[in-house]
Image (cartoon, helix red, strand yellow):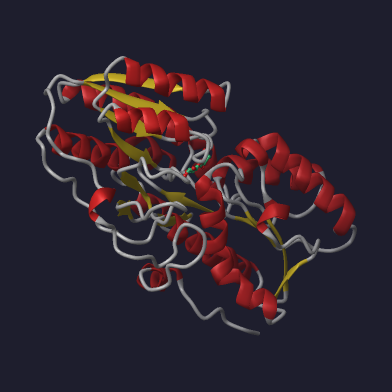
Amino acid sequence: MRTFARSLAAIAAISALTLTGCGREEAAPATDDSSAATGGFDAGAAIGVALPQKTSENWVLAEQLFNEGLSDAGYEPDVQFANSGVSEQQNQISSMITNGVKVLVVGAIDGAQLGTQLQQAKDAGITVIAYDRLLTNTENVDYYVAYDNFQVGELQGQALLDGMEAADPEGPYNIELFAGSPDDANAKVFFDGAMSILQPEIDNGDVVVVSGQETFDQAVTQGWKAENAQKRMDTLLSGNYGSTELDGVLSPNDTLARAILTSVEGAGKELPVVTGQDSEVESVKSIMAGKQYSTINKDTRALVEHTIEMVNNLQAGEEPEINDPDSYDNGVKTVPAYLLEPQIVTKENAAEAYENDPTLAELTK
Ligand code: BGC
């Protein structure tokens, strides 16, 4: 038997030192022109918030929190979802610019497809904050605010190993890998974080990806859609797991984790250890019922609160606080970032993890 070397508790410390992989390269320090000109603006100004599709609960909650928080702070919020896709989001951002917003907060569907709109924003003197997802291949993004995506992946990878070991101390373990939507800049970073933990175990034979589908491109789930993950899991099961046991599945978020569990249940197989992310209500219930193994707590309230604090700084003509100036290279520049720390949640620590969240705390009783 082999014990996995790294514990979840050690990951926070490790991740501070191992910032590698797409979007997390060690890059040159931010140059002066990477931050916005901070002249300040009118206290009652319009603030635009462009959100992607409602692919997980965190986005829906963000809409409500931005509307309430920005209004309470005296601004005029313009918060829009782009459920029809990229061109809708492009049009929404153009309208926000025309309507005179002073700050644009963007949770992009595809962070690489907003170059024209972000150039318009820059020309209009608007400060652009990438929210949760990085905006890529543009110099016209001033700040990034998010939970540490690479660390999310590391926590997921370690939880998968820990869960499988707890279920059966004897390896080797059979697993499958799922990633998020390839147009979302976070998806590769989550996957790379998880693989930084899993790859050594795959290389030494303690963990086996039975289908052989080990690359990001093979693991992606277009649009973060549950039906796509379920379909792929169905195919993986019927093609590879006749009498073979499936011990674990790396799932990048809760929506996909539940789809994967549904597929395995449908195939009549024993449920594997499945990871997740977002602390969605149905997944927290599933964790408490002993089905889904883990999720990640990325409290949307804290993320929105920090974003509004950045808006307040900009309004007052101050430079917003940054705690990670050089990890997020978007292909054109290093975007000054403020990163919050994600937390792994299993049945074991759920009550403690959610004690400040009345809705989720109730589910852990
Ligand atoms: C977010 C995740 C979320 C996913 C799908 C990502 O960009 O960081 O929290 O699960 O989008 O909505």
Q: Is residue 338 left or right of residue 22?
A: left
Looking at this view, is 230 or 125 the one in front? 125
Outermost residue to the bottom: 1
Residue visible at 44% across and 32% down in the picture = 59
Residue visible at 49% across and 30% down in the picture = 52
- Quarter-of-image position of residue 24: bottom left
Query: Can residue 61 be seen in the rendering of this structure?
Result: no
Residue visible at 14% across and 32% down in the picture = 315
Q: How many marks?
A: 0
Looking at this view, is 309 or 33 the one in front? 33
Outermost residue to the front: 123
Query: Can residue 285 be seen in the rendering of this structure?
Result: yes
Please state the horizontal and vertical placement of residue 85, each as a whole percent of the image. 57, 25
Residue visible at 27% across and 22% down in the picture = 101
Looking at this view, is 79 or 204 the one in front? 79
Please state the horizontal and vertical placement of residue 134, each as a whole percent of the image. 43, 45
- Quarter-of-image position of residue 63: top left
Quadrant position of the N terminus in the picture: bottom right
Is residue 168 shown above or below 237? below
Is residue 285 shown above or below 75? below
Please state the horizontal and vertical placement of residue 100, each as a whole percent of the image. 27, 18
Quadrant position of the C terminus in the picture: top left
Please state the horizontal and vertical placement of residue 271, each as a whole percent of the image. 71, 53
Is residue 58 shown above or below 188? above
Q: Is residue 132 left or right of residue 237?
A: left
Q: Is residue 359 left or right of residue 230?
A: left
